Amino acid sequence: MQLPQPPKLAPPRSRPLVLNIAFSFFIALWICLQPYHLVHATEIPVPPEYAPHNEIDQTLPHAPPQAPLIDTNGPAIQERGLEEAGYAPEFTYFDRSLIGRQEAEVVKLENNKNKTGELAPKASSFFVFEKGTGARKREASVLTGPSSNPPGMKNTSGGSVSEDTLEGADLDHEDEFEGTSSQDSLGRRQAAGRNIWISANTCKQPGITAKISENGPPQLSLYVSSSEQKPGPDTPRERLIADPIQFEGGFANFTTQTDEDLFVGVAAPELVPGFEGSWSFEVAASLDGYYHNYLARDYLYMVDTDSDSAVFVTVNLSQSNNTDEFNKIKDNMPFTMYTFSTKNATQHWGLEHSYCGLQNLFNSANNISVNTTFTTKFGGGQPKAQFNVQGLETNAQYTGFLAVGGGDGDLQLPLWAPNNIDVESFSTVRQGGQVFAMWNWTTKAGKYLPTSLLIGLFFYQIHVASYHNTILY
């Protein structure tokens, strides 16, 4: 019997052959993964004729080689207005530092309307009062009288003219225009230009961190030009109408005559050691007179004071004691008195002439209350504003400021001659308000019976000299 034969097996393959095949496979794979075999879309140029066309987003065509340069200050550009000059993109999801700081825009000023701004140290804001802006002229209200500018009206520019001077100049021009043809008259009036009053108030200023000097924070500056759209510290003097106008006590003003656009810049200085923070301000242009005003003149008297209160009254607000006139004044309370302790005198340094500055300061940092009413007591029964100040400390010194708001119309206040009988002129208060000269007083020591303050100063109707305070020990 023949035994079965075992199956024939293929001879084993050579191991070097297998290794060569694997090595060749990896070499081929490595060659395929080289960078120059990969596609980079950014390296493939697209011919212009195949570029996608977008009717909304078009690039500007290149100017011909001989084309003149475009003057960005020329009339063709200015006719488009200044709205596009200050484009500020709204990228909500990006930090401002990533997209850069946009240059300050030029804000339009309207007649008898204020604009507000905020300034960091060494920053500037810009405004324009365009030719043809505003209508002239509004009616004065409340206290009527001849329109004139009082002597002593503060003008920080030093070179501009008062309302009286300009109004008088207008009248002189009108006299000159009589007897001429309408064409010549129109031309001469246009050459004379219109009167424009620029005024500004500092409403907030940097705070004091260390009492290094006896002065307040450095003041803002006002720049005015008819040719430079953004007048400021870097503007050459020949492009400014006048020297830079530094604020005084938070107030600045300037007057000029022009029929062209008037550009205004408000610039903040570099902060000195001992102060930190920013400034806020109001600025306005008017064809009628100063929107903001400061008058370096006393306009009220202290009637009496005790250990914790005081009473003040203004001068007569009318030349008569007519009931209708008194009621008209009473229904429109424009007067305010701001009081500060001299222990904290640094808080109002630099704001002594600013209506909005004193208002903000008194409302935010004071425990003193002032009750304001109208009265016909004293002085022949003529109307006056009366201020009852409460919350004072015994034997303490205080500083007071009389401020008047203009409201929606113009308010004219009589300014009395030294004899207190004749009215020498009127002070016109407009919407930005007016501040009078500050004064100081001291409350009494000890405990006084506040009889005069509680019964409305009845003793003054009898005889001032017959009243004597009684001190309680």
Image (spheres, grey):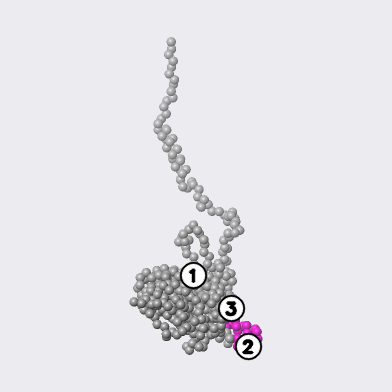
> Alpha-carbon distance for marks 2 and 1?
44 Å
Name the element at disc 2: loop
Q: Nearer the viewer, mark 1 or mark 3?
A: 3
Q: Residue at x 53, y 65 (%)?
A: 87
- Which percent across, then down, holds residue 146? 56, 84
User: Which three-letter amino acid code belongs to the residue tagged 3?
Assistant: Arg
Which residue in the rendered view is the most extreme toward the left? Answer: 473
Who comes first in sequence, dot 2 or dot 1?
A: 1
Which one is in front, 107 or 99? 107
Near mark 3 (Cα within 10 A), the count class, few <14, some 14-19 or many ≥20, is few
For residue 178, the mark is 2
- The quadrant of the rendering that contains the C terminus is bottom left
| Residue holding disc 3 | 138
- Which percent across, then down, holds residue 461? 47, 83
User: Which three-letter amino acid code belongs to the residue tagged 2?
Assistant: Glu
Q: Nearer the viewer, mark 2 or mark 1?
A: 1
